[in-house]
Image (tube, rainbow, N blue to C red):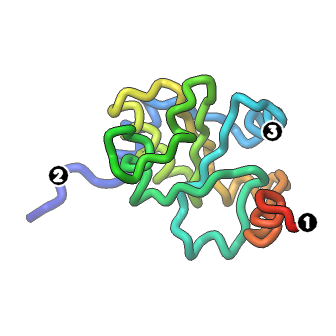
Amino acid sequence: MPITKGFRALVDEAMAEVTTYSVAAVQARLSDAHMQIVDIRDIRELAEGTVVGAFHAPRGMLEFWVDPASPYHKPLFADESREFILFCGAGWRSALAAKALQDMGMRNVAHIDGGYAEWVKQGAPTETLEAQKARRHPTP
């Protein structure tokens, strides 16, 4: 069966419908308590590090974690006072994911243009998973 609409067309359509932020725009808001950065990359990609303060929500579970009717729901995503800014490796999966969340009814969702690769390229702050875990769960 031939593909009638390729990934590029899907990404382009999503990009036209979702809010896209530059790395600089997100970096300028890192101290904003109403912004939650969400890393949707696969667990294997996290070995490279992540954005400081990011919450990891694997792409394959995102819709389930967002939907309050799902047995996998994460209460973090019910906070309507926050803007959830997604990122992936290059900005393609996060565009598709942001569109999927918009299709579910979320209006407080966006993504980072260029993803983690652009974040690192621009020298924005990153942390290892170990540092992130230590920050979230400090030992007494």
Residue under label 1, please give it: 140
Q: Residues within 10 Å of mark 3 (few under 14, many from 20)?
A: some
Asked whether, in this view, residue 95 is left or right of residue 32, the answer is left
Q: CA distance from mark 1 to mark 3?
A: 26 Å
Of residues 97 and 130, which is closer to you in this image?
Answer: 130
Give amino acid for label 2: Thr
Residue under label 3, please give it: 30
Q: Secondary structure at mark 3?
A: loop
- The answer to whether the residues at label 3 and label 2 have Cβ atoms under 8 Å apart is no
Give amino acid for label 1: Pro
47 vs 29: above or below: below
User: Is the C terminus in the top left, top right, bottom left or bottom right quadrant?
Assistant: bottom right
Give amino acid for label 3: Leu
Asked whether, in this view, residue 99 is left or right of residue 124, the answer is left
Asked whether, in this view, residue 76 is left or right of residue 93, the answer is right
Of residues 38 and 21, which is closer to you in this image?
Answer: 38
Where is residue 6? Give x, y as percent: 28, 54
101 vs 7: above or below: above
Where is residue 127? Give x, y as percent: 80, 63
Residue under label 2, please give it: 4
